[in-house]
Image (cartoon, helix red, strand yellow):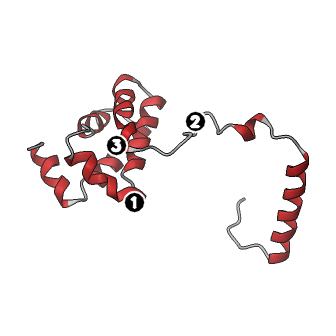
Amino acid sequence: MVSFRRKKKEDTKKAAAGAAEPAANKAPTPKEEKPAKGAPAKPPTLEDIPDLIETMLNSKGEKSAAATKRIYELCDVGHKQNRVPMVCSGKYDVLTPLAQCLTQESGDGRHLACLALNNLSIPTENKRVMALGPA
C-alpha cells in the first residue's frame, strides 16, 4: 500500500544519503538511460499536431489512443494557452479526428477525445468555430 504521509526529516536524510552513494558507484543500467517504451521523450508541442492527427486517423487501438492522449495533453489545464490556436488558427484540424474518435465503441481513445473536446470548448472564441465551423 502506498502512503502519502510525510516522512520525518531523519528518514528523508538517511534515504537521500543511502540513495546517493550507490548511484555514484554503479554504472547506469539501460533502463535508466532511456525512458520507458510507452513514455514520450518530450512533451508534445503544437508543431506535433499534424503527426498526431495522422496517427489518430491511420492507426487503431493503443497507438491511436496514445496520439489522442498527446492531443489532450496539449490542451489540458497546464496548457490553456494552446486551446485557441488549436481550434481557431486554421493551421490544425483537430476537431474532425477527435470527433471520429467518439465513434469508437469503447476504450481510452474515446474517453480522451471527450476530455480534449471538452477542454477545447472552454474558450469563448472556440465555441463559435466548434458550433458553426471555421469562418
Query: How many residues crowd mark 1 within 10 Å: few (<14), some (14–19), many (20+)?
Result: few
Name the front one of labels 3 and 2: 2
Kindly check if marks 1 and 2 are in contact, taking CB atoms under 8 A apart as contact.
no
Q: Give the quadrant of the C terminus.
A: top left
Q: Nearer the viewer, residue 131 or 33?
A: 33
Q: What element carries label 1?
A: helix
Q: Disc 3 marks which residue?
A: 113
For marks 1 and 2, the one nearer the N-term is 2
Q: Is mark 2 on a helix, strand or loop?
A: loop
Q: Which of 6 and 88 is in front in this view?
A: 88
Residue 29 is situated, as x and y percent measured from the top left of the image, at 80, 37
For marks 3 and 2, the one nearer the N-term is 2
Disc 3 marks which amino acid?
Ala
Query: How many residues crowd mark 2 within 10 Å: few (<14), some (14–19), many (20+)?
Result: few
Name the front one of labels 1 and 3: 1
Residue 121 is situated, as x and y percent measured from the top left of the image, at 24, 54
Disc 1 marks which amino acid?
Val
Q: Is mark 3 on a helix, strand or loop?
A: helix
> What is the CA distance from the residue labelled 1 to the residue labelled 3?
15 Å
Residue 92 is situated, as x and y percent measured from the top left of the image, at 26, 38
Residue at the image point whose x is 34% and y is 48% from the top: 116
In the image, residue 21 sits, relative to residue 89, either above or below, namely below
Q: Nearer the viewer, residue 112 or 46?
A: 46
Q: Disc 1 marks which residue?
A: 77
Q: Give the quadrant of the N terminus.
A: bottom right
Q: Disc 2 marks which residue?
A: 38
Disc 2 marks which amino acid?
Gly
For marks 1 and 3, the one nearer the N-term is 1
- Residue 61 is labelled as none
> What is the CA distance from the residue labelled 3 to the residue labelled 2?
19 Å
